[in-house]
Image (tube, rainbow, N blue to C red):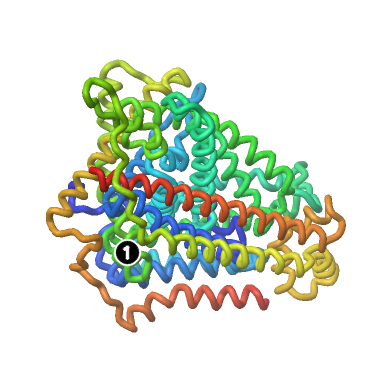
């Protein structure tokens, strides 16, 4: 799923790059809290783990094999921020060193494979863990479902990028069907192996699984022959970093939405089909034709299914902003969750 | 981590390209790819010129063509995708050897193939003329967040260790007669991944404690700083600026 250079046109690549940079900045902050200052060595080793685990080939049937993407696994094992960060670092290194995934498509790749997989997997995982009974089995089941949905989620995001800035003329419906179809299959493999891996770690070192931290039973003391709850830890110290942590998230989300919406509306107002037709008929302005050709999938889509270009452009805009808001809200929701977790973490560290 | 701390992608040499500071090379490669991606696909000759430019850089760096071409093989999956495109794309169709192909699909395939190949070639040149450590230093000089660079450093530094651990586990499994043949064996492989995670995480904790006991407070001391002179930036800028000229010609002609 590594997108090469030239697959998504330059403006959308730049917009995705800005969004990805914002997401990485937010994760850098979050990872510092998740890993309690030891961010660099631990996150680096986890990134090396993801890099290695991607080399682990799983035979599917005669002759074919797949490998883990690792986004969902990282999110559940080390937390969403560290997960985004580690997968992004892996993608960066793959792009620069191994030429796997284009340099200009780095933003698109990070958004698809790091941000969307981690956010989808972690949101689903946390939701399920909250609903299901607090047992190890339900953690494994939640890991399965999170990983299962994360891979098609990335495929949907890829299709969105393609709809806005794809450079080829394959109809959107076909791309969507092919991408999501294939990735649902990949998702099943990813889900089975992620769940089994999380289960294996849970069996040996349950304390290392970030997503299962709520599972630990409260400390009980045996006082005079009967079990009583240990006294609650000292009132949690108000975290200094707490109140200011949401503002950058909001600003990042807003800027991302604005940038994306700006590019989308640019395409909408360029009214691709009319211009394309004129340019093709008369061969007037090559500059303009280049732009129209770059936006052609959207153009074709709008010509085929939605006759009014404004309407279809508006639809594309709504899809784009909707996706951005969804991602932004997901990140915001996790920040809030993390803060709640942090309170308990602080109290335990005070106690210990 | 043995053998001179270089990665196998790096090709040792003493050319002018090797000698350029890494941040200049990173910026130049990135700018070059941006220019290539924003070139109109109808300007076929422009892509030929870009290829000539990259070949010139490879010649200046004394990278043999065979080495470069072998490394380009990473692109094969996209080639398969691009080959499919003329068959599924819409629009005006043209018959080639009795097969009906979409014209815009052919353009799309050409677009992805040309730009993708040039992008891969640029990254391959960058990685084969720049040492890993220098690349990371260059990223730091280009104002990437220091924490991100540190994480990347650790990932690279321990990547081989972790991969080696995975390989030893695989050898241990195979020497006991295990062979992963299908879905039934996924459980074993998942346990491998699980224990690899535990080992990596615990190693991370040990490394962190070792660093703290040696005075680590969150930032790494920079002992081999590399500054780039104006002339070096100018040398590195030759590639993207020439490419930009070609790109502008592609837009106007």
> In front: B3, or A323?
A323
Host chain of mark 1: B
> In front: A215, or A59?
A215
Q: Position of residue B239 (x, y in %)?
A: 45, 73
- Residue at 46%, 26% (x, y): give it: A59
- In the image, residue B39 above or below residue B200: below
Whether residue B134 is visible, yes or no, is yes
Point out the residue furthest to the top here: B177
| Mark 1, residue position | B146
Q: Position of residue A147 (x, y in %)?
A: 51, 35
- In the image, residue B199 above or below residue B11: above
Q: Position of residue A259 (x, y in %)?
A: 61, 67
- In the image, residue A256 above or below residue B20: above
Q: Position of residue B16 (x, y in %)?
A: 30, 72
> In front: B9, or B224?
B224
Q: In the figure, is residue A212 to the left or right of A327?
A: left
Point out the residue furthest to the bottom here: B230
- Residue at 55%, 65% (x, y): give it: A14
Quarter-wise, where is residue A299 in the image? bottom right
**Secondary structure of residue under mark 1:** helix
Q: Quadrant of the C terminus of chain A?
A: top left
Q: In the figure, is residue A72 to the left or right of A46?
A: right
* Crowd around label 1: few <14 · some 14–19 · many ≥20 (10 Å): some
């Amino acid at each position: 799923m590594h997108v090469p250079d030239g697959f998504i046109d330059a403006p959308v690549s730049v917009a995705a790059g800005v969004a990805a940079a914002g997401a990485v900045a937010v994760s850098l902050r979050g990872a510092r809290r998740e890993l309690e200052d030891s961010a660099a060595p631990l996150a680096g080793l986890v990134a090396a783990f993801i890099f290695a685990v991607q080399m682990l080939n799983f035979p599917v049937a005669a002759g074919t094999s797949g490998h883990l993407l690792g986004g969902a696994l990282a999110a559940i094992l080390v937390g969403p921020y560290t997960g985004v960060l580690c997968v992004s670092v892996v993608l960066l290194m793959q792009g620069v060193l191994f030429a796997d995934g284009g340099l200009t498509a780095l933003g698109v790749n990070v958004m698809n494979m790091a941000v969307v997989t981690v956010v989808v997997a972690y949101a689903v995982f946390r939701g399920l863990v909250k609903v299901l009974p607090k047992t190890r089995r339900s953690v494994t089941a939640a890991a399965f479902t999170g990983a299962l949905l994360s891979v098609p989620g990335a495929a949907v995001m890829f299709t969105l990028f393609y709809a806005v800035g794809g450079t080829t003329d394959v109809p959107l419906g076909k791309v969507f069907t092919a991408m999501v179809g294939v990735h649902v299959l990949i998702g099943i493999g990813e889900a089975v192996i992620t769940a089994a891996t999380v289960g294996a770690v849970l069996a040996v070192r349950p304390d290392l699984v970030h997503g299962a931290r709520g599972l630990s039973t409260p400390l009980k003391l045996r006082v005079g022959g009967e079990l009583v709850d240990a006294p609650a830890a000292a009132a949690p110290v108000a975290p200094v970093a707490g109140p200011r942590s949401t503002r950058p998230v909001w600003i990042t989300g807003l800027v991302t939405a604005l940038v994306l919406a700006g590019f989308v509306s640019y395409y909408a107002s360029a009214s691709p089909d009319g211009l394309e037709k004129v340019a093709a008929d008369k061969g007037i302005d090559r500059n303009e034709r280049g732009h129209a050709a770059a936006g052609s999938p959207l153009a074709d889509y709008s010509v085929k299914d939605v006759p009014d270009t404004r309407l279809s452009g508006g639809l594309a805009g709504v899809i784009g902003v909707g996706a951005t808001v969804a991602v932004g809200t997901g990140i915001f929701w996790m920040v809030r969750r993390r803060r709640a977790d942090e309170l308990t973490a602080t109290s335990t560290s005070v106690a210990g | 981590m043995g053998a001179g701390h270089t990665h196998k992608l790096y090709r040792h040499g003493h050319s002018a390209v090797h000698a350029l500071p890494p941040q200049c090379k990173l910026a130049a490669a990135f700018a070059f790819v941006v220019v290539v991606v924003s070139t109109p696909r109808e300007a076929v000759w422009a892509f030929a010129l870009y290829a000539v430019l990259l070949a010139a850089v490879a010649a200046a760096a004394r990278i043999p063509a065979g080495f470069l071409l072998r490394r380009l093989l990473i692109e094969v999956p996209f080639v398969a995708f691009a080959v499919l495109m003329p068959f599924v794309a819409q629009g005006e169709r043209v018959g080639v050897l009795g097969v009906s192909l979409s014209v815009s699909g052919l353009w799309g395939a050409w677009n992805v193939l040309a730009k993708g190949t040039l992008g891969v070639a640029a990254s391959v040149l960058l990685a084969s003329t720049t040492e890993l450590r220098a690349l990371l230093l260059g990223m730091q000089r280009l104002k990437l967040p220091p924490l991100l660079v540190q994480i990347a450093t650790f990932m690279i530094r321990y990547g081989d260790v972790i991969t080696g651990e995975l390989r030893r586990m695989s050898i241990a499994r195979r020497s006991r007669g295990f062979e992963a043949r299908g879905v039934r064996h996924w459980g074993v492989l998942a346990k491998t991944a699980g224990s690899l995670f535990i080992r990596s995480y615990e190693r991370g904790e040990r490394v962190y404690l070792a660093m703290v006991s040696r005075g680590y407070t969150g930032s790494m001391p920079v002992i081999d700083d590399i500054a780039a002179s104006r002339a070096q930036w100018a040398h590195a800028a030759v590639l993207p600026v020439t490419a930009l000229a070609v790109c502008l010609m592609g837009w106007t002609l």
